[in-house]
Every structure is written in C-alpha cells, then in structure tokens.
Image (cartoon, rainbow, N blue to C red):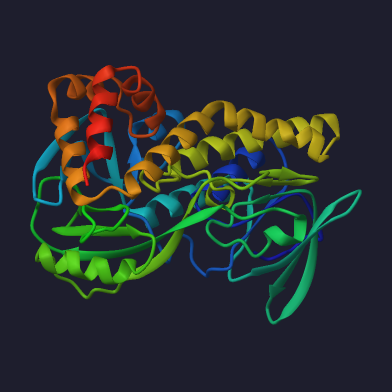
Amino acid sequence: MSVLNSKYDVIIVGAGPIGIYASTRLAEAGFSVLVIEEDAQIGKPRFCTGLISKEAFDQFPLPEGAIEEEFSSATIFSPSGLKLRLKSKSPVYATDRTTFDQGLYHRAREAGVKFLLSCRCLALKVNNDFAEAKVALDASERTIRAEVIILATGIKYSLHKFVGLTLPPDFLDCSQVQTAGRAGEGIEIYLGNSIAPRSFAWVVPLKKNERGAIMSTYQNSASFLKALLKKLSLKGDFNIMRRPIPLGIIKNTYTDRILVVGDAAGQVKPTTGGGIYFGLLCADLAAKTIIDAFRAVDFSGKFLRRYEIKWKKRIEFDLTMGLYLRKLIADFSDEQIEKLIQFSAQEQTQRLIEKYGDFNHHGRLIKELIKRPLFWRSLYQMISTK
C-alpha cells in the first residue's frame, strides 16, 4: 500500500479467510479498514486440506473458483481395517486454500480494505478513546490507532495477553503433507491408537492425482503421519507442515474495543478441527456487532459482549457436544473403537446419521443419539470393554 494512515475505523490483525471476510463486510458498510498480516503472501503458507461445506458457499459469498473436488460421503477405517461408509445430505468441497484465500483478498481490496503484508503486530493497547496496534514495518516500529480491533490471528496468541484475554484450554498437535498417490475411496478417515492415538487421521483426494493427508494427535503427530503415509504407500517430498489446533474456546471473545474471531477465539469444531465455517459465521457476527457499535458510539466491552451472546447462540451447542464426544472417544482402546464402528454401522444408527448428520453442526446428531436406548446400551458395552 502506498499511504498508511495513522488511524482507521477498524484494524484487523490476521489475513486468513476469517479476518479477510470480516474486513470486507466492514468496508462494504463504509468503514475504513486496515488488515495487518505478518506473512508476505496471502494464502501462503497454507495449512488445511481445504474441506469446506456447501452450506458455507450457500451462506457466504465465497470464491467458487477455488473448488477442486466434491464429495458426498466418507469412509472410516477401524483399527482392524473394518470399513464404514458415511453419506452426507449435502456435498463437501475440497478447495485450493491458496486460491480461496486470494479470492477473498481480491474482493476485500475491491471493497477498499487496506493491507499491510510482511508486517508484524507487536502489541495492542486499549485507551479510553481508541485502541492502538504497535507494528514492525520496514525495520521500524509504528503505532496505528482504530476505534476497534479484531483479532483474527489464527493459532498465534501472543497478542492476547496485552488485552487481558486467555488462551484456548487445550490443543491438538496436527501435521499435514501433500503427496502423490492412488485415487483411494474419496475422503478417508483412519482410527486406532497405533495410527492416530486419541484422535484420527484423514486423507483427501486433490487434483492432479494428489492427496492431502492430515494427522491429528496430542503429540508426535509428524511421526505418526510418516507411518501412515508408508502404510498407505503414499509418496511425495514429505515436506510436512505442523501446527496446533485449539480445543475449546477462550474465556471471553470480547473486551473493550476488541473482538476475537476464528481459531484465535477457539471457534473450531472439536471433532474434526475444522474452523472455516464457524469462523466465517463468527466474523459475520463480529462485523454486524461493530457496525452497531459505531451507530451507538459505544465500543465498551459491555456493548461488544452482544457478539459473544450471538455466536454462542448459533454454535456453542455444537462446540460443547463435540468436545464431550472427543473427550469420551479419546481414551477408547482399539477394541472399543471397533465396537463404536459396529454401532455406527447398525441400520438404526445409519438412519439417524443420514437424517441428522451434518458436516458443520455435529451437535444435532449427538442430541438425537442420546435420546435412543440403543445408544446407551452400546455405550455401556463400549465402556465395559477392556
């Protein structure tokens, strides 16, 4: 950018898809918006298989040119190799995340959003009349003011402490690689304590006969990913990328003149670690809250709290149920996992999955399952298994 102002209406720290989407919503509403991003390029480096639901594309104006593949089912492999195929009512898209992010970026630029790339935000400070961000730019430090700041920093939490925010209570250790390999059976999910202890791994077909593989564990994910790649005869340069994924939300997603969205807030599905849809939804609610704050000329935590009330009304149930389910299954033995697969393969359970299963809203299915005596009988058998 050619000219850097000393003050904007809104500063957003983080130019991932969640931060960029929020910036566009605000710029289109007539506000001056600055996005600060420490990486030099939008969408690089990327860490994501790029699985995004049709619901997200239907609900938000997203770059459809990023879609590479479409899936309507997934195959789960038990520790013994037992297969369970799950069908989805609505398709899920595999997207090129670099193209996806850059598509959002170009739309934001067209809306008037200003971007500072290769710029690190060092600190935040909230004053009575404004908030400010201290940034490192061109070998010097500058302070930029705004009425309100959105933290969309992903899994980087160094700024939280400056404004009294907490961290997510727990994290998954995740590793990802893109490889050449067989066509496979669409989306594949692998369970087992020798494969992905206390969690799971998944492999997603990409274009050009490539596949994206992600391993999620609580530690040593890169080692387990290498073992899975060898087991599946998947080949590539094995340039493994590794990052944490938050499990659980931070204590407050707001304070005076500050809102937090996406991974930075812990707004991530505990079951799968996916955060695009929930992040976009919360970014939209954050933008609406900020627009209301400008109308009321009130940027206090008391006013901005309505953002948290709104997003919790939309997704807190799914987050809570997903976290309970993850914690329950995390300690399952391989034999218990086998019984879980057998339970899921039963005709009655399959009917419930087909009716209530949802790529984004896992709480709906869990709510229906716990109403059924079959679930409790099966759960007792699983827990009783040594």
Q: Looking at the image, which residue is at 61% across and 61% down? A: 157
Out of 371 and 44, give the one closest to the viewer.
371
Count of numbered badges drawn on the protein? 0
Vertical placement of residue 375 versus 146, above or below = above
- Residue 84 on image: x %, y %: 13, 38
Query: Is residue 193 left or right of 100 when viewed as pictured?
Result: left
- Residue 281 on image: x %, y %: 52, 35
Vertical placement of residue 272 versus 302, above or below = below
- Residue 283 on image: x %, y %: 58, 40
Vertical placement of residue 45 versus 108, above or below = below
Q: Looking at the image, which residue is at 53% across and 32% down? A: 316
Look at the image and tell me whether residue 113 can be seen. Answer: yes
Look at the image and tell me whether residue 288 can be seen. Answer: no
**Residue 282, quarter of the rendered image:** top right
Query: Is residue 116 left or right of 381 when viewed as pictured?
Result: right
Query: Is residue 357 left or right of 150 when viewed as pictured?
Result: left
- Residue 181 on image: x %, y %: 11, 62
